[in-house]
Image (cartoon, rainbow, N blue to C red):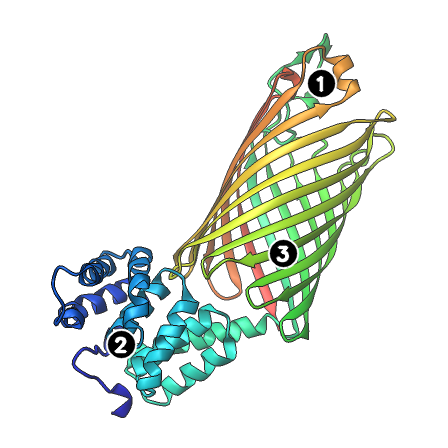
Amino acid sequence: MHTNYRRKNNINLYKLFRLKPLCVLVVFGLMYASNTAVYADTDSNTLAQKIWKVSLQQSLNGQAAECFANLKRLEPTLLGDITFDRQFGLCAQGAGYNDQALLAYNRILAQQPQNAEIRLERARVFYNLKLNSESRKEFNWLLSKNPPREAARIIHDYINALNKRQARFKEQTSLRVSTTLGYDDNVNSAPELDQFLGFVLNDSSKASSSSYIGANVGFEYSKRLQHYSGLRFSASLGTKHYPSADFVDQDLATAGVAYVQHLDKASRGIDVLLYQQNLNGDFNSRGMIGRLYYQANIDNRTSVTPYLKASAFRFSDNLLAKNINQYVYGLKYGKVLDTERKTILTADVNFTHDYPVFVNSNYEVDIYSLKFDYRHPINDDLISNTTLQYSLFDYDNAFFKLAFPEPRDDDLFSVQSRLQWNLSKKLTINPTIGYKDFSSSVDIFTYKRWFADLTLNYKWSW
């Protein structure tokens, strides 16, 4: 077939291709002997040949970034050579430099426009660069050439992914129902002390363990506005009951709206959430949370997102702390560690400033936080998510200084691990376990807490 055109140094990727790094290594291994012919007529001691041989070995070792860096040095000399451009494109693609890979593949296709192997790689690069129409055009062309079954299956997977990506900007409605069963060994985050400053704590103020049951109903509606922007409206009602503890049962209602716009190599958005929370009367609260962010995609694997979040919380008149205004300034760094499995590591550093009203006097609290989130799909139906967070609290509060002569110094460490098990497209199970350790120079505020629960989610979309 004309589209399977091969010359001496070409390997049919249709037969080897699995969309995995291993495929690239196999291809490089089979090509190694023939590729060295690029410098067959060159002195074996030349720097260029040494660089070429090193890059081949790096590709075999899975060192795509190092391979790309070395071949980049040879690009001015060998640009346009099909063997070089193939090697350069694959290393650039593996290292996440999709724009460089695209240039290399275009140079090959200028000489061999029917080269199915390179057009397959170029289609993947288009997909990674979010050039959806170009990617779909290439995949459709490949399907029209009757590729082998395995290659056709992979191409269909990409086309399905393109359909899902496009569906995000279509009008869509979803309804989600969930129920939770769990256990918490310190539901009210109480200290281990039985008394403080001569006051004996009552039973409701002491550490209490309890099982709990919860239920939630959520609604979401997405509306496409322009080619790459949209609105999302959401609302939810939830309740949680602790049969063995006092003053911790809660009912929660939320309503929100979000706007997002996807640019060429970035996305930006704003969202607002309103809430009403009922906690046994006196602890009721209501408020609004707004967030503004800009996500810049450095390359196909790396993103940096500065964000600003402003919140206003209002509590019952029976509480000493009636109003709290909170501002969060943060920077989030995301890295895709494995492009095949979509393993993602996120680091989030932020600064929070609270302005509460306490006994008719303002006081301020500064919170410095660092959070890591690791998301790893174990397989197509099982995804693990682990979150670590550490926070430091700095108080500027005349009330606390009067009550506690020594400076108050607090820190919080928390860890949470969650699994998402997709039983079907609609039904998921989420087992979760978490631990918190809040330490304070004032013992009455020190506590430890762990919990575990199991959530069942069912979602309808239309």
Labels 1 and 3: the sequence-earlier one: 1
Q: Label 1: state its secondary structure.
A: loop
Q: Closer to the camera, 186 or 92?
A: 92
Viewer-nearest of discs 1 and 3: 3
Give the answer, above or below, for where 44 lies relative to 317.
below
Which residue in the protein does label 2 denote?
81
Q: CA distance from mark 1 to mark 3?
A: 48 Å
Viewer-nearest of discs 3 and 2: 2
| Residue under the image location 75 percent in, 18 percent down | 400
40 relative position to 189: left or right: left
Labels 2 and 1: the sequence-earlier one: 2
At label 1, which amino acid type do we have?
Asn
Which residue in the protein does label 1 denote?
202
Q: CA distance from mark 2 to mark 1?
A: 81 Å
Give the answer, above or below, for where 47 lies relative to 361.
below
At label 3, which amino acid type do we have?
Tyr
Q: CA distance from mark 3 to mark 2?
A: 40 Å
| Residue under the image location 14 percent in, 72 percent down | 37
Labels 3 and 2: the sequence-earlier one: 2
Evaluate whether residue 51 shows in this view: yes
How far across and how far down the image is residue 224, in percent? 67, 73
Q: Closer to the camera, 10 or 434?
A: 10
